[in-house]
Amino acid sequence: MTRGALPKRVAAAVLLAVLSACSVIAGVDFGDVHPQGDSVGSQDGSVPLGDAQIDGGPLPGDDGGPPGLVDGAVEASSCTPDPNAVVCKGKCGDVVDNCGGARKCSTDCGLGQTCSAGLCQCVPQANWCTNRCGPSVNNCAQSVDCGGCGADSGLTCSAKGACGCDPQSDTTTCAGKACGSAVNNCGQTVACGNGGQCAITGAICLAGGVCCVDDGKACVGRCGGVSVTNNCGQTVGCPQACTAGVVCVGTSCCTPEALATTCAGKACGPATNNCGQAVTCPNTCAAPNTCGGGGAGTNGCGCTSTGNPCGTRCGGIQVTDNCGTAYTCNTSCGLDGVCPCAGGFCSNNYCSCKPPPCL
């Protein structure tokens, strides 16, 4: 190899590098005219598939499926709790209802009853044997022996369990009383009604021998276990939940309005209904619009532009972005940030670089 051959080969290598730099710069193949990763938009307004990138993802419900509750929403009941008359029959204090909710039954079991271990239990009358003799069955259906009449009294115990007295019938003694107790003509305490209790299922015995049944009205539309006073004067706890499909808001039941009512005037996005439930309105936005796009707001439809689609286009042509907005591209090419080569020229509406030298 001669001494002049090496410099010539070095110069040739440098020239090839310059040519390569002019033909591909920053990922743009100017030799083939079309830029790499063409920008969205074209002269006829079409949007090439795969090139559009819309900022922001869809809001909940944008998948076209049925709207549902979002995090933090008040859920509607899926089970209808039984009324207190059913849940609290024979029970008192804290119980669990058919829906698994905590319930407070009244601890007032009425006359002749007491609340013990969660059950209403009969309390035997302490004076049951007063003026009574022989075997007897008390107000709690317990067998008791009231003894004799006393040896010095000279009296014998009659078949009706009295000493020297003929007791009137319990029906006469208890006239006007459906429960509780009364004292007959012999001074004996007798149990009225059904052993001192009401014959009506679920009824409690009030003062004066009156039977009362909780009509359930005190808990109508109430929930959350709120304590109320019923028509029998008892303090009772309402169910935790409302009937199926109804929402418990605080301590009151609320029937959710139709989704169409909640979402009236809203094209998409989140909303709050009359019961305070957070719901998602159906997405009615049509492409290229998206929910909340283009600054349309939470419940509006708008288009988010991907930017000026001209890229390396030139020749003053008009192109549109993904939202249909028109842009006029540069007339010529040069050192203006579009074509990085000095002496760039516009060919087929795209900027290209002239052959070397490239400055």
Image (cartoon, helix red, strand yellow):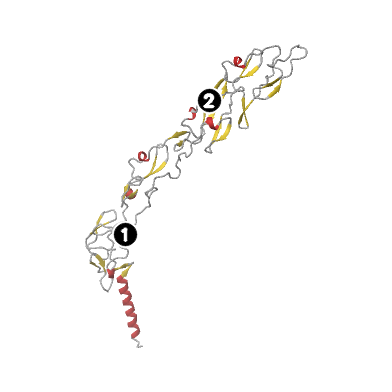
Work out whether residue 229 or residue 303 is closer to the camera in this orientation and state it: 229
Can see residue 131?
no
Q: Position of residue 224 (x, y in %)?
A: 50, 35
Number of numbered discs on residues:
2
Q: Which residue is under mark 1?
A: 49
Does 319 appear above or below 60?
A: below
The dot on residue 293 is none
Residue depicted at 53% across the width and 31% down the height = 86
Q: Residue at x 34, y 82 (%)?
A: 9
The answer to which of marks 2 and 1 sits earlier in the sequence is 1
Q: Secondary structure at mark 2?
A: strand
Task: Say few, some or many: other residues with alpha carbon within 10 Å of mark 1 (under 14 / 14 to 19 / 20 or more).
Answer: few
The residue tagged 2 is: 213
Type of amino acid at the residue the image marks with label 1 = Leu
Q: Quadrant of residue 26?
A: bottom left
| Residue farthest front in this picture | 159
Q: Residue furthest right?
A: 152
Circle 2 residues within 10 Å: few <14, some 14–19, many ≥20: some
For the C terminus, the quadrant is bottom left
| Image spot of residue 322 (x, y percent) | 29, 55
Q: What kind of residue is marked 2?
A: Val
Question: Would residue 266 appear left or right of 330 to someone viewing this image?
Answer: right
The image position of residue 327, as x and y in percent, is 25, 57
Q: Is residue 136 above or below residue 248?
A: above
